[in-house]
Amino acid sequence: MTQKQFIYTLKLIPRLVDENNWTEKEESIVSDHFQALQELKMADKLIMAGRTLNMDETTFGIVILLADTEEDARTMMENDPAVKEGVMTAELFPYKIALLNENFLKLNQNA
C-alpha cells in the first residue's frame, strides 16, 4: 500500500500565546511533543515539522506525515502530547507535496 501525505496544523491555546503564562508543565508537554515528532521521524512517518517564529494569535505549527490511512494520521495527531494534553489544538488535512527543494537540507545542515 502506498502511503499518503497528511498535514496537521497546530495552534497554541489562547492563554499560552503570552509566554508569561507558560509553566513548567507546558514546557514539559512541549518537550514531549518534540520528542514524539522525533520518534515519528525515526519511524519514517514524519516528513517535516516546524512553526512560525512570531508569538501572537497568528502563530501556528505544521506537521507533515506519511500514513497508510487518514485514520492512522488522525491517531498520530491525536497522540501528539501537545494535542493530547490540551496545550495546542490541531486540524488534519489530506496533503500532497507538489514541489520540494532537495538542496534545502544540504544547504541548511548546520543552520
Image: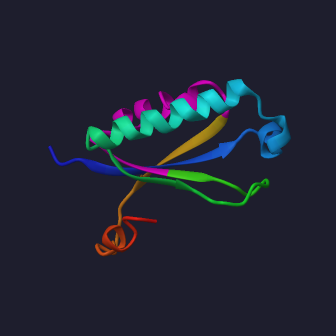
Residue positioned most to the left = 1
Instruction: Give the residue displayed 35% in from the left and 35% down from the top.
Output: 39
Whole-percent x, y for residue 101 in the image? 33, 75
- On screen, residue 49 versus residue 58, left or right, reads left
The answer to which quarter of the image holds residue 14 is top right
The answer to which quarter of the image holds residue 102 is bottom left
Instruction: Give the residue displayed 76% in from the left and 28% down from the top.
Output: 23
**Count of marks placed on residues:** 0
Looking at the image, residue 87 lies above or below residue 102: above
Question: Magenta region: which residues?
Answer: 63-87
Whole-percent x, y for residue 54 in the image? 72, 60
- On screen, residue 60 versus residue 47, left or right, reads right
Instruction: Give the residue displayed 39% in from the left and 50% down from the top.
Output: 6
In this view, the residue in front, 32 or 49, is: 32
Looking at the image, residue 36 lies above or below residue 60: above
Assign the N terminus to one quadrant of the image: top left
